[in-house]
Image (cartoon, grey):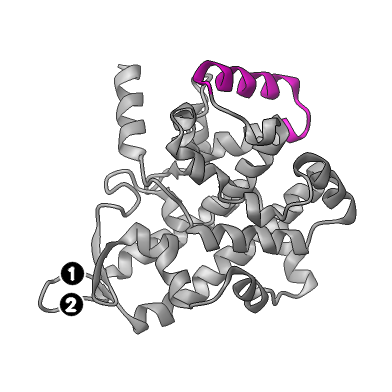
Amino acid sequence: MKKLLLLFFLVGSYHSAFSWGKNGHRIVAAICELYMSKEAKEEMVKIMGPDYLAELANWPDYIKSEKGWKMADSWHYTTVHVGQSTQEVRNYYGKDEDINDALEAMDLMIDILRDDPVAIEWLEDKMEKNKAKPLRGSIKATALAFLTHIVADVHQPLHVGKNKDRGGNNITVLYFDERSNLHAVWDSKIIDQEQLSYTEFTHFINKTAPEMIREIQSASIDEWCNESILLREDIYNNIYNYTDRETGLPSFKWDYQHDYIPKVKDRLLKGGLRLAGLLNEILG
């Protein structure tokens, strides 16, 4: 019975092949670098070399084309049902030794960056069995890239999603009169509609008072997810306030962009600030 239930949970929870679009992940990484301590940056360079963190932020999406890394597909999201807590999700997945979702994957990457030998051995063993290649031949570079990516993912509200519609992938919408789906709109289309480079976007949203930064960074990982859940429910509850009369489909144009771009910016900024706080703690 447990095996059948777990299979249903995993299959039903599969959301999307991708997460925040490429620029979304770059923006979170770029914000992060602005707020990393000197000590943390020095340690980061030892791990990944002179490249910008934004250059590595999309690596966990790129390797989805590699058979050996299929094991990591579920690390990009978590499923939290209405009325369910993130702790209940942790308890459910904690019944086995595998890494099943974004919450467990973040914990693993944090432990690896903290030199936990058990976590390092677990991932090395998994990579060897699946013939998965680490980033730059380094277990720590691999963990850093995944942590950077996943922290951004859990700030995308549909990556803390609902399994029945695959995190919005099964909900057809019109975005500026072109057919798309709700998940794709939130992954990349709202960001791309602004027609900014990731560096321009980063500059535009980097406007936070020091006291607010401390408050944002003090939130726990479960609180990050709870914020995404609240926004997720707002998205679902208001989707049919924007409807095309001819097709009956949700139709998002400038009104939707106007209403939700501030929330997208908020999630990207918080993701970057929190990643910086986490890396400062781990590497600083």
The image quarter in which residue 12 lies: top left
**Mark 1, residue position:** 249
Residue 170 appears left or right of 222: left
Residue 123's spot in the image, x, y percent? 62, 24
N-term-proximal mark, 2 vs 1: 2
In the image, the segment drawn in magenta is 112-131
Query: How many C-alpha atoms fall within 10 Å of the one at disc 1: few (<14), some, or many (≥20)?
Result: some
Residue 182's spot in the image, x, y percent? 32, 61
Determine whether the residue tagged by mark 1 lies in a helix, strand or loop.
Answer: loop
The image quarter in which residue 143 lies: top right
Callouts 2 and 1 close, C-beta under 8 Å: yes
Name the one closer to the observer, 123 or 244: 123
User: Residue shown at 69%/74% (left/top)?
Assistant: 206
Q: Amino acid at mark 2?
A: Asp
Residue 256 belongs to the span the image colors magenta: no
Residue 14's spot in the image, x, y percent? 35, 40
Residue 129 belongs to the span the image colors magenta: yes
Q: Amino acid at mark 1?
A: Leu
Q: Main secondary structure of the magenta part?
A: helix
Determine whether the residue tagged by mark 2 lies in a helix, strand or loop.
Answer: loop
Give the residue furthest to the left. Answer: 246
**How far apart are the alpha carbons under marks 2 and 1?**
6 Å
User: Residue shown at 32%/43% (left/top)?
Assistant: 163
**Mark 2, residue position:** 244
